Image (cartoon, rainbow, N blue to C red):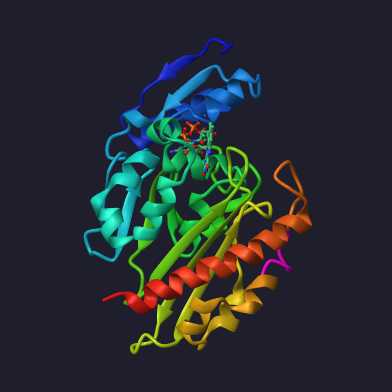
Amino acid sequence: MLPPFEIHQPATPAEAVALRARHGESAALYAGGSELLLAMKEGLGAVEHLIDVKTIGGLDTLALASDGAALVIGATVTHRALERSPLLRSRFPMLADMERQVANVRVRAVGTLGGNLCFAEPHSDPPTALLVHEARVVLHGGAGPRRLALADFLVGPYESALGPDEILTHVEIPLPPPRAAAAYLKFGLRERPTVGVAALLVPDVARVAVAEARVAVGCVGPVAARLPEVERALSGLPLAALEAGWPSAETSGERLDAVGDLHGSAEYKRAMAGVFVKRALAQAARRARAAA
Ligand SMILES: Cc1cc2nc3c(=O)[nH]c(=O)nc-3n(C[C@H](O)[C@H](O)[C@H](O)COP(=O)(O)OP(=O)(O)OC[C@H]3O[C@@H](n4cnc5c(N)ncnc54)[C@H](O)[C@@H]3O)c2cc1C
């Protein structure tokens, strides 16, 4: 059963920040509640005040930034809205595809991107896919807004760089370089993924070889992370070779800081990461060669 609580509905980030400061550790920010309410039912944390971020104006929209250089997604935009967004599907098809694979439709209808990133559950999809897009988060605290690379926001399991007086207001995703193509693949036998892999390839002008590669693996270690050594090794390789299956990808999980858990042993997760890096690269390479 849920313990009794008072709900607060701020209209602005500043009001939410003031409520956090006033109620301290007895307060929690609340969006879709798909994680928080479960935790409260389990008796985790003594939450007496819920601060509903969905009433804050302007956090439920996604649009291109005024300079057109990035997509700006409000923290309370749901997975379902992202999955169905024509803008996301046309400009960031891999992200729309990833969102379609999150949880089930009931969770996607209420769960928000902001809630997902702030809860920092290691077995999540969006952080991995957003890392290869070099996303940034915008946080609003007592001292005003600040921007942080997503890679710096993700600190550890259930731990982010969100300050005690801050809320996440937006996620900014820079438009990818010309000709870039991406793929996201996940695998799992439980509700949440065992492994998630994102690959983004920027081909050369002729669309023959890799000019830039970005690869991220999630769910295997404490936080989703890029694989810089794999990315460097991919530079200059023919796209056709990746499409056929790059053998070296199979060992790409070996250096991961893997954690064994209910989803499998550390060794199993490293091996699965290698399998899915290979498949994600093949899919991204096929898209990079085919794109008009
Ligand atoms: C059955 C099930 C299956 C799932 N499967 C998947 C899956 O396959 N992949 C996946 O990625 N996720 C999965 N999830 C997790 C869930 O869908 C997401 O994490 C969801 O997006 C959480 O968002 P929310 O709005 O419900 O967060 P809430 O529960 O409202 O909040 C989560 C946390 O974030 C904080 N918070 C919320 N909004 C903000 C904000 N704007 N600023 C600062 N802090 C904030 C809250 O205080 C809380 O600590 C699953 C969940 C369930 C229940």
Query: Which of the two residues, 71 or 282, is positioned nearer the viewer here?
Result: 282
Query: Which of the two residues, 74 or 226, is positioned nearer the viewer here?
Result: 226
Instruction: Determine if residue 144 is in view.
Output: no
Query: Which of the two residues, 198 or 59, is positioned nearer the viewer here?
Result: 198
Q: Can you say whether 220 is above or below 179 in the image?
A: above
Residue at the spot x=59%, y=21% of the render? 40
In the image, is residue 158 part of the stretch drawn in magenta? no
Residue 23: x, y in percent?
Answer: 53, 23
In the image, is residue 253 part of the stretch drawn in magenta? yes
Residue 137: x, y in percent?
Answer: 44, 53
Q: Quarter of the image for the N terminus: give it.
A: top right
Outermost residue on the left side: it is 66
Left or right of 195 in this view: 171: left
Outermost residue on the front side: it is 244
Left or right of 83 in this view: 20: right
Q: Quadrant of residue 181?
A: bottom left
Left or right of 122 in this view: 99: left
Residue at the spot x=71%, y=63% of the render? 256
Residue 122: x, y in percent?
Answer: 62, 47
Q: Quadrant of residue 206?
A: bottom left
Magenta: main secondary structure equals: loop
Instruction: Determine if residue 220 is in view.
Output: yes
Q: Quadrant of residue 271?
A: bottom right
Residue at the spot x=41%, y=34% of the render? 105
Query: Which of the two residues, 197 or 145, is positioned nearer the viewer here?
Result: 197
The stretch of residues the image draws in magenta is 252-257
Q: Can you say whether 72 is above or below 46 in the image?
A: below
Q: Quarter of the image for the C terminus: give it.
A: bottom left
Left or right of 136 in this view: 206: left
Residue at the spot x=34%, y=46% of the render? 82
